[in-house]
């Protein structure tokens, strides 16, 4: 957006009145603020993607190969034979509309083509024309249409207005995962070099440097050393992590956003403090330095290539198992794809906490455990000394990140950790959390600057829920376990609910953590003064969680 409108002005642009023409007869209009710039030739060339060139989505000529239609039709044919789910999803939708109003982008824009059913129909109509007898014979009467340039541009515009959050799939009576339709759509667009730079830039950087930001090994070490200086200033304790150490028990991998930008850096400080307090035998890698996987937003094959570095580094360093940081799509990839792509990891052991002895059998195949599970287990077994009063200035609610929630079922663990580190916790309304959580509005590579109107509108449903608990209970902090959420929700909250901040859960853990030998804490990790009584009572390890209040006002224990 050239000039960011005020929230009340942006709300006035949401229009649920359908167009006067049918959806097939309504041409796509590529609007500023609603799309990301096209992928650059340099990024495409780096990873060997086809039709590498610089191009502009607002220009008429997208510099396509002459046989682009043939390439796409053959691409659809190949994926129909490769992915059984894709063929199934093309055939079984009855267009009941159960998903129609479940997408945050439809709620935030009012554009019918952002209804999940209609976004999928953009591709399904082409499938019918070229791969079904009724479509070949009856054409439009059978819901089929030709693949022309306008259809291609429509695909590009709307498949990059989907964050692949899968909220719509929760409500589908047939179990159609519309996110997989979007994923196939993006794979097909990749065959023509039609990706976005906000995705392809990080993919190229990760392919060459091991992380999305393109951080060199010495830069990673330097960034962490800055955090260590801050930790020592706050706690008086010198934390000394290791890097690329062979023979460590655990390899720790986290999204690179935690190494570079606030509030992710505070979450990273939380990891460092926790591991030091435990005396954990772990190491960082400056080569497999990215848990996230933007390749997942381009193609399965690219995602597989980027993911492979984690197991390769674990094998090189000779660790026993892998611990992963707070991230969203990182964990959907690990939980649902990693073992198929790059397993079996038979050179690793089933993760077992060296502190509690708990064996994480749910990670038996991947050999990789989410840090929120690890920390919840520590608290349950009374291994952490926590003073929740250090977070008393916060009234916290929790955003279920789409991928860890719908992709992993991590609902209780983060809430358990929060309620053991904070005295004031409030749930957002039913229908906006857990399986039905709303997306941040900027996932799947859409967290750019040029599509800010799209992001703000897509983030509106989550912001509304946060606004509700802010006004009802005074909530001033939105916690989550996803690096993209920490970046995207910061922008969204600043715009829609500026009194609500954003935090990772392990920042809250670090604030509450009473470390052995620490000096009296004067500030939290952000440098804000702690308002603590002069005499601090002895704190029991693993204290029981307080009662929480839901948006309905009821107390849950």
Image (cartoon, rainbow, N blue to C red):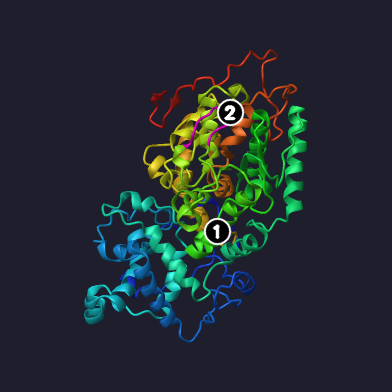
Q: Position of residue 363 (x, y in %)?
A: 47, 42
Residue 534 appears in the rendering: yes
Pick the front one: 259 or 536: 259
Mark before the other along the chain sequence, 2 or 1 = 1
Residue 471 appears in the rendering: no
User: How many marks are shown on the rendered structure?
Assistant: 2
Horizontal placement of 506 versus 109: left or right?
A: right
Q: Position of residue 137 (x, y in %)?
A: 22, 81
Work out how far the residue at label 2 is from the one at label 1, CA to CA, in angstroms: 33 Å
What crowding class fits label 1: few (fewer than 14 Cα within 10 Å), some (14-19), or many (20 or more)?
many
What crowding class fits label 2: few (fewer than 14 Cα within 10 Å), some (14-19), or many (20 or more)?
some
Query: Which span of residues is magenta-colored?
Result: 352-360
Image mark for residue 294: 1
Callout 2 touching callout 1 (CB < 8 Å)? no
Pick the front one: 218 or 391: 218
Horizontal placement of 478 versus 121: left or right?
A: right
The correct choice, above or below, for 513 with respect to 480 in the image is: above
Residue 354 part of the magenta-drawn span: yes
Q: Nearer the viewer, mark 2 or mark 1?
A: 2
Label 2: which residue? 355
């Amino acid at each position: 957006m050239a000039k960011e409108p005020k929230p009340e002005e942006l709300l006035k642009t949401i229009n649920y009145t359908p167009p006067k023409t049918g959806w097939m007869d309504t041409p796509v209009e590529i609007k500023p603020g609603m799309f990301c710039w096209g992928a650059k030739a340099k990024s495409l060339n780096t990873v060997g993607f086809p039709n590498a060139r610089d191009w502009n989505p607002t220009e008429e000529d997208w510099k396509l190969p002459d046989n682009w239609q043939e390439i796409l039709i053959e691409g659809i044919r190949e994926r129909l034979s490769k992915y059984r789910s894709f063929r199934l999803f093309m055939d079984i939708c009855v267009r009941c509309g159960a998903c129609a109003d479940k997408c945050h982008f439809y709620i935030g824009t009012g554009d019918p083509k952002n209804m999940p059913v209609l976004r999928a129909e953009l591709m399904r109509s082409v499938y019918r024309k070229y791969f079904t007898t009724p479509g070949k014979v009856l054409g439009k009467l059978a819901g089929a249409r030709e693949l022309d340039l306008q259809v291609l541009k429509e695909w590009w515009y709307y498949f990059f207005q989907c964050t692949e959050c899968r909220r719509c799939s929760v409500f589908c009576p047939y179990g159609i995962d519309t996110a997989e339709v979007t994923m196939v759509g993006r794979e097909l667009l990749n065959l023509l070099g039609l990706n976005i730079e906000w995705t392809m830039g990080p993919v190229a950087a990760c392919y060459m440097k091991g992380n999305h930001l393109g951080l060199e090994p010495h830069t990673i070490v330097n960034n962490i050393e800055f955090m260590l200086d801050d930790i020592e200033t706050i706690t008086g304790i010198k934390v000394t992590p290791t890097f690329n150490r062979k023979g460590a028990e655990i390899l720790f991998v986290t999204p690179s956003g935690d190494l570079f930008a606030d509030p992710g850096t505070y979450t990273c400080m939380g990891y460092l403090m926790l591991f030091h307090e435990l005396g954990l035998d772990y190491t960082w890698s400056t080569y497999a330095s990215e848990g996230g996987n933007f390749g997942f937003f381009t193609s399965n094959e690219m995602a597989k290539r980027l993911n492979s570095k984690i197991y390769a580094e674990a094998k090189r360093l000779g660790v026993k198992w892998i611990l992963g940081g707070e991230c969203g799509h990182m964990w959907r990839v690990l939980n649902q794809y990693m073992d198929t792509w790059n397993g079996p990891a038979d050179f690793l052991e089933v993760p077992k906490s060296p502190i509690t002895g708990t064996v994480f059998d749910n990670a038996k195949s991947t050999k990789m455990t989410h840090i929120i599970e690890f920390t919840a287990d520590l608290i349950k077994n009374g291994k952490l000394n926590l003073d929740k009063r250090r977070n008393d200035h916060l009234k916290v609610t929790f955003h279920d990140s789409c991928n860890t929630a719908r992709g992993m079922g991590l609902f209780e663990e983060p809430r358990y950790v929060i309620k053991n580190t904070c005295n004031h916790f409030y749930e957002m309304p039913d229908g906006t959390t857990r399986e039905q959580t709303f997306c941040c509005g900027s996932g799947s590579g859409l967290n750019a600057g040029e599509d800010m109107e799209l992001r703000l509108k897509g983030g509106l449903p989550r912001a509304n829920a946060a606004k509700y608990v802010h006004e009802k209970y005074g909530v001033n902090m939105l916690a989550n376990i996803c690096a993209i959420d920490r970046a995207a929700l910061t922008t969204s909250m600043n715009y829609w609910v500026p009194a609500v901040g954003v935090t990772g859960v392990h920042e809250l853990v670090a604030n509450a953590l009473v470390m052995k030998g620490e000096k009296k804490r004067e500030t939290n990790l952000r440098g804000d003064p702690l308002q603590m009584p002069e005499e601090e009572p002895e704190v029991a390890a693993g204290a029981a969680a307080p009662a929480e209040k839901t948006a309905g006002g009821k107390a849950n224990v």
